[in-house]
Structures are given as structure tokens and as C-alpha cells.
Image: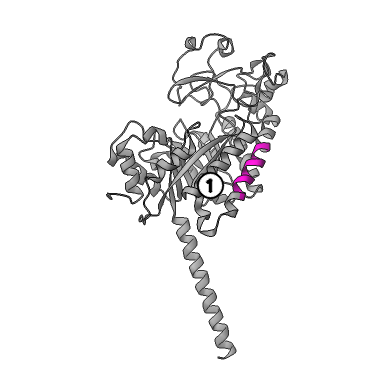
């Protein structure tokens, strides 16, 4: 064999390897995930056992089943949170089910009164300066909130929401993420090559927004010491931004960020705060080693095409949104579609999704299929498994999408 023939042979083998790798990468890129979310407090292994029963080793579909869990790192001790993350990852490997690790520092932060307790001398963490770490309902710390309300199916009282631009709050988020993100990456990197796909991704944010998942009633602070059954019961008016039909908040973050300190609170400024919040946390995750295709944001959108949709977009992550109004067909969500046209991310996610009020198998199947058919949709996450596991139509549709049972 001549030297030229040997060189051609090497080039041929090299070309074949490149082709094989490109085919493998393309196949991985085509993979999509139908994720079932675990509600906080539910026993992880119970869910893994239940979800395993939906799978079939004979399935040849490119849609794979996954499980998501939320870790609110400011709502419990660091050791507790680490332990739960490690348990979740261990079960993913044991049951061979891909997972989404969802990191939340916004919705629940009960374990850090050192950040939010500015008013109660009798409780841990009391410091009057903490009023700068919570949201305000006016342009001064005299309007600091002591209480807020949330309605996820029913109204409950919650702590005042964080000032997303507070340096102390941002540092607390960074401190916990610097522990949890490497924990996930170390697990992922130690997996054998044939199990690397067990990590679908890490999600940052949980319907990140201001004034929706922690809203405020007029004279709300005065209600703190009154019976909860005397609280007002108002439905938010989603299209009335920024107040949403109650008392607008976000003044603390806008002031801290230097966007404004007087006048009317602007929708664009609130959207910019959420964008900066997610950009900062995603930048940290990227610095810690999370590749863009494994990192997702999570923003809500309640008014059609509101500016908040754009806050999901940054150069470190893939954008993600909630879908309830448009669960039947997310392509009709014009806010999402507007942002996707601008996105250069490899993927996006329907990171919180639920078809409400239906047990019709065909409706569920069509809604899931439409969502996954939108270009670059990496995964959709049904919130929550506990709400649909007894829904025969939903479960049958999930099995059909996964290639288990009758195909539509």
C-alpha cells in the first residue's frame, strides 16, 4: 500500500467517524422529553415508581419520559436541600429516567428571616434594614411589604416577595447556587456515556415575575395580625399591568436598579428587572459549567404579548415559559412566538404546562403533540403528576405519545 493510499484510508476512516458523530449528535438533538413534575413534599421514590410504569423498553419514539422536581434553596437549610437533590439524582440513575432540576429562589424563602424579617422583633433574623430586601408598594422603604398573597388554585398568605435587585438577596441566591449547581454537574459528568442524557437540564426561575405570584391588597400590612378568613378575595386582572387589579409592587427593585425613583411604575422596568435577575443567575450557572443546551429559564405571561415574555431570553440559557391559557396550542401564544423569533438558543421549553379541566384522551394527545411539534421544543413539563395520575385520558395520551399502547 502506498503512502497516498494509506493517507486516503485514514481520511476515509476520519470522515466516517465525523459522519457517525454528526448522526449521533443529530439524534440527541432530536430527542424531546415529556416531563412530569413532582409537587413539593411528595415522596420522590413513589413518583419514580409510578412514572416507570408509563414506559416501555420497546418504544422507538424520539419523545422520552422525564421527571422534574423543584428545589427552593432559600426555603430550607443547605444540608436539607443538598440531601434532596442528591436523592433525586440517585433515583434518576437507579430508575433510568431523565430529570429536570428546578432551582427556585423566588417563590419560597421562609428559611431566611435574616433577609425578610424587618418588622418582628420576636422572630429570628429581625433587622430593620431588611426592608431593603423585600418589595415595596411605593417609592420609599416606608412602603415595605410584610405580607403578600398567592393564588395557585386557592388563595394563601405568603411572605413579602424579595427585592430581586437587593445585593443581599442576590448574594444569598449565588451562595446556594454555587453549592447546588456543581452538585448536579458532578453527578452528570460521572455518568457513563450511555446515561449522560439523564440530565435534561437545570431550570432557573419559577414563573419569574413581579406582582403576580406574590401580590398585595390595599392596606395589606394591616391584615397581617387579623384572621386569614377576613382577607379580601380578588381575582387578578392580568391585562392591567403593572398593578394587575390590586396594588402594584416592584418599586424596591426598580429603585435599587436605578431605573426610576419617582413617577408611575412602568411595565418595561418590571420586565427589565426580571430579565436582569434571570440573566445574572444564568450567567453564574454558565460560569459554573452548565452548557447552554442544558440551562433553561422560566417566565410567566398573563397578558397577551406583555413585555415580561422577553425576560426569558439571555445568551446563557434556553428560554422557557408557562402554558395554561395556550396549553392546547402554544403556537398561538404570540408573546412566546415573538421571543422565539429573536432567540438564537438551541432549544426552548414549555417548562410549566397543564391542560386544565379535561380528561379527554384525544384533546390531551393533540395538545401534547402540538406543543412538542413547535421547532426546537426540547421539553414540556406537566404541572403536576399528582393532578393527572388518576386522569385516564391524560395518562392514555401520555402513553400514546411515548409509543406505549395504541398510536393515534
Q: Which residue is mark 1?
A: 201
Residue 227, percent from left and from top: 52, 9
Above-or-below relation of 348 to 227: below
Q: In this view of the protein, can residue 200 be seen by the observer?
A: yes
Residue sitting nearer the eye, 367 or 182: 182
Residue 57 relative to residue 211: left or right: left
Magenta region includes residue 406: no
Which segment did they paint magenta? 175-186
Q: 164 or 237, which is in the foreground? A: 164
Q: Main secondary structure of the magenta part?
A: helix
x, y (%) of residue 148? Answer: 55, 19
Is residue 133 or residue 70 the one in the foreground? 70
Residue 218, position as x, y percentages in the image: 54, 13
Tell me the residue at 50%/18% (across/down). 246
Q: Position of residue 2 (x, y in %)?
A: 57, 91
Q: Is residue 351 left or right of residue 359?
A: right
Q: Secondary structure at mark 1?
A: strand
Amino acid at each position: 500500500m502506498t503512502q497516498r493510499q494509506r493517507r486516503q484510508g485514514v481520511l476515509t476512516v476520519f470522515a466516517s467517524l465525523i459522519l457517525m458523530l454528526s448522526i449521533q449528535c443529530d439524534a440527541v438533538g432530536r430527542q424531546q422529553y415529556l416531563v412530569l413534575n413532582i409537587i413539593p413534599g411528595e415522596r420522590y421514590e413513589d413518583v419514580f415508581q409510578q412514572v416507570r410504569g408509563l414506559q416501555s423498553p420497546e418504544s422507538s419514539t424520539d419523545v422520552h419520559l422525564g421527571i422534574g422536581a423543584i428545589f427552593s434553596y432559600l426555603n430550607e437549610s443547605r444540608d436539607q436541600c443538598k440531601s434532596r437533590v442528591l436523592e433525586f439524582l440517585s433515583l434518576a440513575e437507579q430508575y433510568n429516567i431523565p430529570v429536570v432540576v428546578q432551582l427556585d429562589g423566588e417563590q419560597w424563602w421562609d428559611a431566611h428571616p435574616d433577609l425578610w424579617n424587618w418588622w418582628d422583633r420576636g422572630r429570628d433574623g429581625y433587622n430593620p434594614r431588611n426592608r431593603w430586601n423585600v418589595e415595596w408598594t411605593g417609592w420609599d422603604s416606608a412602603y415595605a411589604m410584610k405580607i403578600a398573597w398567592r393564588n395557585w388554585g386557592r388563595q394563601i398568605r405568603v411572605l413579602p416577595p424579595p427585592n430581586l435587585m437587593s445585593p443581599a438577596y442576590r448574594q444569598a441566591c449565588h451562595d446556594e447556587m454555587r453549592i447546588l449547581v456543581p452538585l448536579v454537574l458532578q453527578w452528570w459528568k460521572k455518568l457513563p456515556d450511555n446515561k449522560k442524557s439523564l440530565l435534561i437540564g437545570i431550570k432557573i426561575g419559577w414563573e419569574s415575575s413581579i406582582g403576580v405570584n406574590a401580590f398585595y391588597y390595599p392596606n395589606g400590612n394591616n391584615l397581617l395580625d387579623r384572621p386569614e378568613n377576613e382577607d379580601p378575595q380578588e381575582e387578578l386582572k392580568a391585562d392591567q399591568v403593572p398593578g394587575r387589579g390590586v396594588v402594584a409592587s416592584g418599586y424596591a427593585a426598580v429603585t435599587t436598579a436605578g431605573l426610576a425613583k419617582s413617577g408611575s411604575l412602568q411595565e418595561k422596568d418590571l420586565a427589565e428587572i426580571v430579565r436582569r435577575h434571570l440573566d445574572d443567575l444564568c450567567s453564574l450557572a454558565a460560569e459554573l459549567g452548565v452548557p447552554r443546551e442544558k440551562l433553561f429559564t422560566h417566565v410567566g405571561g398573563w397578558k397577551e404579548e406583555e413585555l415580561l415574555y422577553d425576560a426569558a431570553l439571555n445568551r446563557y440559557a434556553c428560554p422557557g415559559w408557562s402554558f395554561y391559557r395556550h396549553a392546547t396550542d402554544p403556537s398561538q401564544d404570540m408573546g412566546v412566538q415573538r421571543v422565539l423569533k429573536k432567540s438564537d438558543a438551541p432549544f426552548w421549553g414549555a417548562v410549566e404546562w397543564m391542560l386544565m379541566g379535561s380528561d379527554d384522551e384525544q384533546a390531551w394527545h393533540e395538545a401534547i403533540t402540538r406543543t412538542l411539534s413547535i421547532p426546537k421544543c426540547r421539553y414540556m413539563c406537566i404541572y403536576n403528576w399528582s393532578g393527572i395520575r388518576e386522569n385516564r385520558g391524560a395518562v392514555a395520551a401520555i402513553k400514546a405519545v411515548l409509543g406505549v399502547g395504541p398510536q393515534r
